[in-house]
């Protein structure tokens, strides 16, 4: 059985060691590593440090540090193999200059393996936490302030995309760090052109424990997936192969924008000292001024909407809220669940379609540079969000058979078109953001 990222030795870097120690449960040792890093990088005398233990820090760590210069919030993102990746981390100032609401760090270190940000200390909550509290809320009046705040942010981001949309070359596209969230996680760094990375360490040759059955990847990879009655054209194996070739960075020459690139709601402060929360982005690890336009909003679209409620970040809760049944019929693996987007997430989806995605695609079309296969590129990037951000196999990390089945079904819905023209939530969304399409019920099944 091949080694997983969770079990692999830590990279020889402070950030890699800290993440590995946290995964192993040695919090005190991880905090000591981060404290030493802050002292060395910024010349601060550290008197106390605590790492937050939250569900949203899948590839990062954050927390609070006391220094001789005051108290700060810290955060860093860490990718395996990042010393061999292209692109510069943490370009917050270009976001502020473009007009995006972004919290600028007080101190920044961008050296590979030692990248970390210090922010002024806040009492605000992250939008992820505010939204999580509302995932079971059905009272529209109680949802309204957060929906309005998200709507305001979508409008602001859409306007920046409109103003900064510009031609980019293959070389400019390739240099953007946002690819670390997609293609770089599929690369075998020792064998260029060969799929590997997290796909290989998470899934290849591994066993998948699902409700009522266990399948090895060799059996699972070529099965078509039926998710809640919709049969999809492509298998998981075919989707990984397609993502590896289709999301190659040079393929995104065309149009780019200035973007945060990873503005999921755990990277957004919700300032709630007024009637409507004011949202401010932070942790711009993948920010850029030439971000391929089709990739700029993918992470925010998936992680703020389809990753909820519960199944990705809190699988231990999902198993108490949802049911999942799995059966095999010939070459089809049927996954049946009672999972659905909550009213809050559906509202987020509707506004993301109307305020951001459709205007962006319409402007790209007006300039004659909307790729004919834009749906394909977008779907493959969405597919990478759940499958490569963490290991979806039960027992490999936090996942259990129920949440694993949910994750695989949702991932295939993201990546593959339904067979025979059947409808699903994502297909309705894509229809709604077609530049010449209809915006009626963008998240509803037709």
Image (spheres, rainbow, N blue to C red):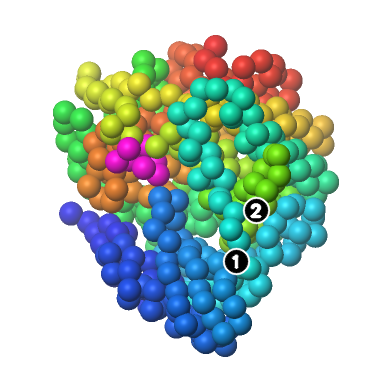
* Mark drawn on residue 205: none
Name the residue located 32 percent from the left edge and 43 percent from the top edge.
Answer: 392
Q: Is residue 257 left or right of residue 207?
A: right
Query: Which residue corresponds to mark 2?
Result: 281
Name the residue located 40 percent from the left edge and 78 percent from the top edge.
Answer: 33
Query: Which residue corresponds to mark 1?
Result: 121
Residue 122 percent location from the top left of the image? 60, 61
Q: Is residue 289 left or right of residue 263?
A: right
Q: CA distance from mark 2 to mark 1?
A: 15 Å
Residue 351 percent location from the top left of the image? 66, 29
Residue 214 percent location from the top left of the image? 17, 35
The N terminus lies in which quarter of the figure? bottom left
Residue 2 percent location from the top left of the image? 22, 56
Q: Secondary structure at mark 2?
A: strand
Name the residue located 28 percent from the left edge and 69 percent from the top edge.
Answer: 26
Highlighted magenta segment, given as a residue range: 311-317
Q: Is residue 82 above or below residue 272?
A: below
């Amino acid at each position: 059985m091949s080694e997983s990222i969770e079990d692999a030795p830590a990279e020889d870097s402070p950030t890699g060691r800290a993440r590995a120690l946290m995964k192993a449960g040695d919090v005190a040792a991880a905090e000591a590593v981060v404290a030493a890093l802050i002292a060395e990088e910024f010349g601060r005398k550290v008197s106390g440090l605590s790492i937050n233990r939250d569900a949203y820090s899948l590839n990062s760590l954050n927390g609070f540090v006391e220094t001789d210069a005051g108290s700060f919030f810290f955060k860093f993102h860490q990718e395996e193999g990042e010393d061999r990746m292209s692109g510069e981390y943490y370009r917050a100032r270009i976001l502020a200059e473009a007009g995006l609401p972004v919290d600028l760090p007080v101190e920044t270190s961008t050296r590979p393996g030692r990248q970390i940000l210090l922010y002024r200390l806040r009492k605000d909550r992250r939008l992820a936490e505010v939204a999580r509290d509302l995932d079971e809320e059905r009272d529209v009046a109680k949802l309204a302030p957060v929906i309005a705040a998200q709507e305001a942010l979508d409008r602001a981001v859409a306007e920046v995309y409109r103003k900064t949309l510009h031609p980019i070359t293959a070389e400019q596209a390739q240099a953007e760090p946002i690819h670390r969230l997609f293609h770089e996680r599929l690369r075998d760094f020792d064998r260029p052109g060969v799929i590997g990375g997290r796909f290989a360490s998470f899934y290849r040759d591994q066993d998948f424990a699902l409700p009522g059955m266990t399948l090895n990847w060799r059996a699972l990879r070529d099965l078509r997936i039926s998710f809640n009655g919709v049969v999809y054209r492509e298998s998981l194996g075919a989707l990984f192969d397609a993502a590896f070739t289709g999301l190659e960075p040079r393929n995104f020459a065309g149009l780019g924008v200035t973007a945060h690139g990873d503005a999921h709601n755990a990277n957004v402060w919700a300032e709630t000292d007024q009637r409507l929360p004011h949202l401010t982005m932070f942790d711009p690890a993948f920010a850029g001024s030439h971000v391929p336009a089709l990739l700029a909003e993918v992470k925010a679209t998936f992680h703020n909407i389809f990753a909820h409620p519960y199944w990705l970040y809190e699988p231990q809760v999902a198993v108490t809220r949802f049911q999942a049944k799995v059966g095999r019929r010939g070459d089809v693996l049927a996954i049946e669940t009672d999972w659905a987007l909550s009213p809050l997430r559906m509202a987020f989806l509707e506004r993301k379609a109307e305020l951001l995605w459709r205007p962006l695609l319409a402007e790209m079309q007006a300039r004659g540079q909307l790729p004919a296969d834009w749906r394909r590129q977008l779907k493959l990037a969405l597919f990478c969000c759940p499958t490569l951000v963490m290991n979806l196999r039960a027992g490999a990390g936090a996942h259990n058979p129920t949440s694993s089945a949910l994750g695989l079904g949702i991932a295939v819905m993201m990546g593959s078109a339904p067979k025979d023209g059947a409808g699903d939530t994502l297909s309705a969304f894509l229809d709604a953001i077609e530049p010449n399409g209809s915006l009626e019920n963008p998240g509803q099944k037709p």
